[in-house]
Image: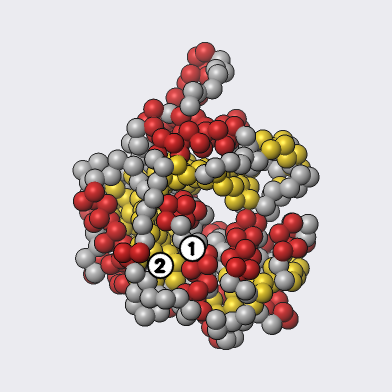
């Protein structure tokens, strides 16, 4: 290893995962935390913990100065960004490089390229990877001309940022000005930059992404694909690996395109290449995420590869050359994100003190969380409180195992999305493996109409 101490510039379950991986690699850890997070139990597992500021993320987890000061004070030589916060901030990576710190992820140059969604599209398109028609919204010209060239329906998307923030669907020219104004406003809030682009929208496509690992010698492998089509307002709710109902020739072509993409941008580290898949089997690159993904556990469960450990090894230059033939997909895995949100009130965040009654356990069940009884869910951070992952020898076994695990996830004090997750995985469309990105909205509309007509009904059968 080229370093012996890793500072974890994040919080919650991903910080815990990094601590566990570092322990297995005999590395010391420095867990930074805000004042609001001072009681999180995993801090005791780190070699050292440091408070870096108040609850406000801008003054703690998003503060480059605070994190760099913590690294200098603790003697850490490497920084793991987790996901969210500064994980895809090319400026932060550049500052780490300038200070001689190993950033556990890609270089600042690669991060900058991938952060510019249009530049990334151009790079992968030049490598032969298919992309949807699109182009930059130029403030000097009328965007309606570009929209007509692309064709409706289309998406208005921020050039910078991610996570589905700022994306707007436009079905006709009449809605374009308002969509651009709203998207620009949200883009500034998310990334500080107003740049937008338009992209052809597919109707109810599937969202397929490929996990890749790339070493410093140019070796790149994939760990299969994940289906992340169960989304609400571009936010993923349920993910699974491998993707169901996918023709083998399409699966192979998507894997090959993901490897082409990583090579085209000179990628090193763990990353994810995302595609949209149309009904006719055509697929299109949409972006590459230069970090570990929230949904990475399903890939770990079907390959047996600890992605956090591999990410750290790759950053240290301590990994053996990657060999595709050594990676084998076994069984099926499903992940449900559990958010502290109230589905009965439009999924608004639900804050409060948690009473923890039960977490699911058992063969093939994994819970990634840092919950404890009496924990306060704060309005300052993301509403994700747990991830439940179920593995099975086949998809149906994994699905039934997940339903049981969701029944056993019992917390009080905050509203959660557990019931919505159960409704999704028990729905006939999901059971058939034919879910598109519009599925959740359709399901919620159906339920709203049914509730209005008949009152509240019972639950779905598994």
**Where in the figure is residue 41, as x and y percent of width and height?**
74, 56
**Where in the figure is residue 48, as x and y percent of width and height?**
74, 71
Secondary structure found at label 2? strand
What residue is disc 2 on? 213
> Could you tell me which residue is drawn at 73 percent across and 47 percent down?
372
Q: Relative to 179, is 21 on the left or the right?
A: right
> Could you tell me which residue is drawn at 48 percent across and 27 percent down?
462
Q: Which of the two residues, 43 or 415, is positioned nearer the viewer here?
A: 43
**Where in the figure is residue 433, as x and y percent of width and height?**
35, 37
Quarter where residue 231 is shown = top left
Q: Residues within 10 Å of mark 1 (few under 14, many from 20)?
A: many
Quarter where residue 344 is shown = top right
**Residue 257 visible (yes or no):** yes
Residue 195 vertical placement versus 458 (above, below): below
Residue 80 vertical placement versus 437 (above, below): below
**Residue 148 visible (yes or no):** no
> Could you tell me which residue is drawn at 49 percent across and 63 percent down?
307
Tell me whether the residue at label 2 lies in contact with that at label 1, contact meaning CB atoms closer than 8 angstroms: yes
> Could you tell me which residue is drawn at 47 percent across and 21 percent down?
449
**Where in the figure is residue 71, as x and y percent of width and height?**
67, 78
Q: Which mark is residue 292?
A: none
Q: Mark 2 or 1 closer to N-term?
A: 2
Q: Which of the two residues, 115 or 248, is positioned nearer the viewer here?
A: 248
Residue 321 vertical placement versus 17 (above, below): below
Q: Which of the two residues, 218 or 203, is positioned nearer the viewer here?
A: 218
Q: Which mark is residue 307?
A: 1
């Amino acid at each position: 290893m080229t370093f012996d101490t890793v500072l974890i510039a994040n919080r919650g379950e991903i910080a815990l995962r990094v601590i566990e991986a570092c322990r297995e690699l005999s590395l010391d850890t420095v867990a930074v935390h805000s004042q609001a997070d001072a009681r999180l139990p995993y801090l005791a597992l780190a070699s050292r913990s440091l408070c870096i500021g108040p609850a406000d993320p801008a003054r703690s987890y998003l503060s480059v100065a605070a994190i760099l000061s913590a690294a200098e004070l603790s003697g850490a030589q490497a920084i793991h960004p987790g996901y969210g916060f500064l994980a895809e901030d090319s400026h932060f990576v550049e500052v780490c490089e300038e200070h001689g710190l190993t950033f556990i992820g890609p270089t600042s140059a690669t991060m900058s390229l991938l952060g510019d969604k249009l530049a990334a599209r151009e790079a992968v398109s030049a490598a032969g990877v298919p992309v949807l028609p699109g182009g930059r919204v130029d403030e000097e010209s009328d965007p309606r001309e570009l929209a007509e060239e692309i064709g409706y329906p289309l998406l208005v998307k921020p050039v910078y940022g991610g996570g589905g923030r700022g994306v707007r669907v436009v079905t006709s020219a009449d809605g374009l000005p308002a969509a651009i104004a709203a998207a620009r406003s949200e883009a500034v809030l998310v990334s500080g930059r107003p740049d937008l682009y338009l992209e052809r929208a597919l109707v109810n496509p599937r969202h397929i992404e490929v996990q890749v690992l790339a070493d410093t010698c140019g070796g790149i492998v994939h760990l299969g694909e994940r289906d992340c089509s169960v989304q609400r307002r571009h936010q993923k709710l349920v993910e699974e690996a491998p993707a169901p109902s996918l023709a083998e020739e399409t699966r192979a072509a998507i894997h090959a395109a993901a490897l082409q993409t990583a090579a085209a941008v000179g990628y090193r580290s763990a990353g994810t290449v995302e595609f949209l898949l149309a009904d006719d089997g055509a697929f299109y690159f949409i972006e590459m995420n230069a970090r570990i993904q929230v949904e990475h556990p399903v890939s770990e469960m079907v390959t047996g590869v600890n992605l956090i450990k591999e990410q750290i090894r790759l950053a240290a230059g301590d990994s053996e050359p990657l060999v595709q033939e050594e990676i084998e997909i076994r069984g099926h895995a499903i992940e449900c994100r559990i958010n502290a949100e109230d589905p009965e009130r439009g999924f608004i965040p639900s804050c409060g003190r948690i009473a923890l009654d039960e977490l699911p356990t058992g063969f093939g069940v994994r819970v990634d969380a840092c919950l404890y009884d009496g924990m306060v869910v704060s309005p300052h951070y993301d509403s994700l409180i747990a991830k439940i992952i179920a593995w099975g020898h086949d998809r149906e076994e994994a699905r039934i195992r997940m339903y049981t695990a969701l029944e056993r996830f019992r917390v009080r004090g905050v509203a959660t999305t557990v019931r919505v997750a159960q409704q999704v995985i028990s729905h006939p469309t999901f059971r058939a493996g034919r879910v598109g990105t519009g599925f959740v909205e359709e399901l919620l509309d159906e339920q709203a109409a049914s509730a209005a007509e008949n009152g509240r009904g019972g639950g779905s059968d598994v």
